[in-house]
Image: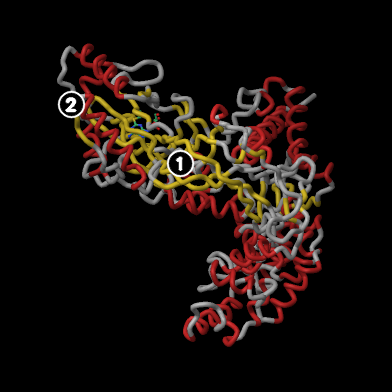
Amino acid sequence: MISVKQIENVAKRAEELKRLINYHNHRYYVLDAPEVSDAEYDELMRELIDIEAAYPELITPDSPTQRVGGEPSNAFKPVRHRTKMLSLANAFSFSELAAFFNRISSELGTNEVEMVCELKIDGVAVSLDYDHGMYAGAATRGDGEVGEDITTNVKTIQSLPLRLFLDSPLDTLEVRGEAYLSKEQFKQINEERGDAGQLEFANPRNAAAGSLRQLDPKITAKRHLGIFVYALGYAAGVEFSDQWELLQYLKIAGFKVNPHIAKVGTPKEAYEFCKEWQEKRHSLPFEIDGVVIKVNSFAQQEKLGITSKAPRWAIAYKFPAEQKTTKLISVELNVGRTGALTPTAVLEPVVIAGSTVSRATLHNEDEIKRKDIRIGDTVIVQKAGDVIPEIVAPIVSKRDGSEKEFVMPRECPVCGGEVVRPEGEAVARCININCPAVIFEHLIHFASRGAMDIEGLGESVARQLLDKGMIKDVADIYYLDKEKLLSIEHFADKAAENLYNAIRKSTDRPLARVLFALGIRHVGSHVAEVLADSFNSIGKLSHATLEELIKIQEIGPKIAESIVGFFHEERNRTVLEKLHRAGVKMEQEKPKSTNYTRSFAGMTFVFTGALTLFTRDEAEGLVKSIGGKASSSVSKKTDYVVVGKNPGSKYDKAKSLGVKIITEDDFKRLISGQQERGV
Ligand code: IVH
């Protein structure tokens, strides 16, 4: 007989698995940043399938086993909106705007309809809840009726008022707005992702959505999202007469309301506002994809009503993605820090979306073939908002036969070294580790702000140092004297002295920065910090095995392999030796934040069953205090499973995986041992 308790445990485990799998699904499909190997993922999936086969009543529509193709956003609790979150009907031309106006004026029986024009912010719609003037929650739009709870993530947005500036705040207020990323932030996030070897976000909207769907609000906070509010969801006990008044109220209440708004009375005036912002959009620090036109009076809005999806009193005028035709002059190959050869289209310059475009990304060889783009073609180039310009298609009818197909060379255009494209990979790489292009990019990264931060060592200086043969690798910069630096063009005494000092100063950078600067593939600034805190020394890290690395939370097989491969390379070891001799920091005394021994740093503990000596929170807090991590599920990476009374399935799982199982008393001893030693 199966006890109720056991069934409860299975149900709990099923829920946990769904959450875990959805989380990993999201990391993989949405963020393109997996944390677990395919095998580990499959293992979780198999366990859930088994449970659901034995207990079909546990199957829910949100179970990943029920997901066809993936709707990877169920990681957050569902929230039912008090009133539906609507979307908008679109207009793409003046005549569509005029048709909208004609319809509403005929339904209202008057031509005198005041409308409010607002910018259409290209971000993520959110609903914000206030309880007696205090921030009480936030949700995404979801399907309009039920969204996801993003309360803690939205709370990190600095421009969000946590307490409203109102003398007598309403009992309940729900407002709607758009969370967005500035163009500047978007660029920075993509640069960081590029450095870490992650796929870049296609546009600020995707980046904003990704930022709001982080399980760790600290990451959201680092993204510096903004928020504009523009609509009411629900307000208890207050009547607004129109949209304009509402916007003023929201502004006074402390919300960020976009200042570029206008009252208009005719479709022509509305269209002029649209045109004006279509032109000026590039001067804004954030992305807009159109203009929203709303009937101002709430009485008139009510009269017009809503359809199942959108209000009948508003319309979104969408800006067209800007396209131009031009000539593809040639294809240039850029050799990156990892030796990757990226083809770039060199175009006859054209002005698109407010800026001159003379280059466009071609991604890779397959993409060029797929689109059948040939050198000499007349091509359609598109720039949607702040996205990198791209070639949409060639105009085949304009060909005269002189066009040439692009062929990836077998030799590196910079050093003549061999170019290799491994089976199944899209990227071709120069495999010469001494390729000057690779060294150049590496040096620029090494000296960059987030790395060794060497002021004065920019592209032009780097180029000269390499061209003049003054350095062969990054470590050589520490052996340049002032005399040598004076031979750099346009370098007077002072500049040489400054650079010399900046180089010397950089030897003092913390270990994590040095690790990041080394440019190990897949080791971005965050991973570098994790590694620094786990090993405290490059020497120790260089001896770490794959198994040891994979045990560390946040280090997956891809990163681990890259690290081991890096230290295996003779040339890298020579560079490290030279850096060490030059006095660059290769160690840190203690892990940064706490005072625990390395033996517990990064170790993972899982608790199961009822604890009698501590509350769960206390136990997890203690784990943190000794530098470990508390996790909710057992895997091969778990170091200790602490069992209380009536342990659940985690206990069996730990046994089957051979994970160390300890009692609460053992745990207490372990902790006090650590604390008594005062480490
Ligand atoms: S009003 C019923 N105003 O555009 C009210 N929406 O394509 C519906 N948006 O889902 C929204 N800026 O996420 C409104 N000033 C603005 C907006 C705006 C951006 C977004 C919003 C909406 C989507 C519709």
In the rendered image, the quadrant that contains the N terminus is: top right
In the rendered image, the quadrant that contains the C terminus is: bottom right
SS for callout 1: helix
Structural distance between the alpha carbons of marks 2 and 1: 38 Å
Q: Residues within 10 Å of mark 2 (few under 14, many from 20)?
A: some
Q: Where, by quadrant of the figure, is residue 228 drawn?
A: top left
Ligand 1: give its quadrant. top left
Residue 405 can be seen, yes or no: yes
Q: Nearer the viewer, residue 44 or 638?
A: 44
Residue identified by numbered label 1: 151
Q: Nearer the viewer, residue 659 or 610?
A: 659
Residue pictured at 32% horizontal, 47% vertical = 163
SS for callout 2: loop
Disc 1 marks a residue whose amino acid type is: Thr
Residue 213 can be seen, yes or no: no
Q: Position of residue 528 (x, y in %)?
A: 64, 61
Residue 294 appears left or right of 18: left
Residue pictured at 27% horizontal, 27% vertical = 294
Q: Position of residue 221 (x, y in %)?
A: 48, 51
Disc 2 marks a residue whose amino acid type is: Gly
Mark 2 or mark 1: which comes first in sequence?
1
State whether residue 510 is above or below residue 495.
above
Residue identified by numbered label 2: 265
